[in-house]
Image (tube, helix red, strand yellow):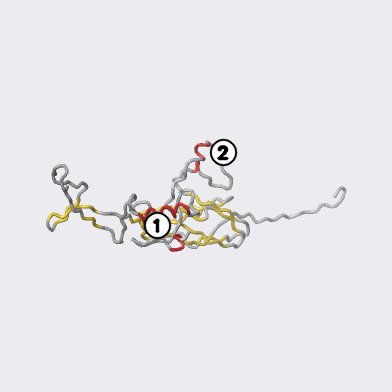
Amino acid sequence: VTAGPTFHLRLKAIVTMPDLNVSNDTLDFATVKCGECKIATIQLKNPQEIRCEWVAIYPGEDTNSKQVGRFPRRGNISTSRRKPSTRIFEVLPPSGSLLPGQKINVQIKFTPTEEINYESRVLLRINQSSQRLMIICRGVGLEPQIIIGQMHGDIFEPTTSIIFNPILTHSQGDEQDIVIRNPCMFPIELYNLEFDKQYLEEEKILRLLPGYDENNNILLPTRTAGDKLPAELQKF
């Protein structure tokens, strides 16, 4: 106040950073067959009194060619159009925002591509915060395999080539018996891509289904070896 008394003001503020609590930071998916996936659910909670925005990042992934924030980076056009690779462990949804005290269920999908032991870290980066949540993911892939061979007496001998006996032209030909064995601990299915009518019909149906992701994958109920597509899909 001009030519008046002086007033002293005391200003107080609480400075805090966004934070997240996770219900489980270690996930064990056990064994999953290649071509299938398993999904685990975790819960995120915002314990602070401010809004929290987060995004999933994957260590070792080329972040220059992927959008890791809310806004895409400007860069090489050919790099931005590069086809994304399938992630072994993937967070769904990949990002989100939580109000103070709010909770959300997040899914982590495990999709093995070969028969090995997988272990990876998935990080949740929090906007305007120096802290990151780390989730350890483990799993084992199971790949269907077969062994082709021939019986020589009572002995099975694996082979990669079938040798036929010499024959004359225009004769009855020669036949060789082969044995196919399944060394896996689960049943597998064999079919011919060109002559199996059931496979050809199912492929026509699958091509018409909506819901494929950016990697041309779609999630469907699992089927045991030899089963057909569900009746709901056959009527599609």
Name the residue type under label 1.
Answer: Glu
Instruction: Determine which of the numbered discs, if any, sits on residue 74 in the image.
Output: 2
Residue carrying label 1: 36
Can you give x and y, in whole percent of width and height, for residue 85 in the image?
44, 46
Foreground residue among 83 and 177? 177
In which quadrant of the rendered view does residue 73 lie? top right
**Residue 53 placed where, x, y %?**
58, 53
Which of the numbered marks, if any, corresponds to residue 179?
A: none
Q: Earlier in the sequence, mark 1 or mark 2?
A: 1
Give how far across and how far down residue 123 sits, in percent.
Answer: 48, 52
Q: Residue furthest left?
A: 153
Residue 55 relative to residue 177: left or right = right
Seen in the image, is 52 located left or right of residue 34? right
Task: State the SS at label 2.
Answer: loop
Position of residue 19 in the picture relative to residue 29 (left or right): right
What is the tally of numbered marks visible in this picture? 2
Residue type beneath disc 2: Arg
Helix, strand or loop under label 1: loop
* As drawn, 72 above or below 224: above
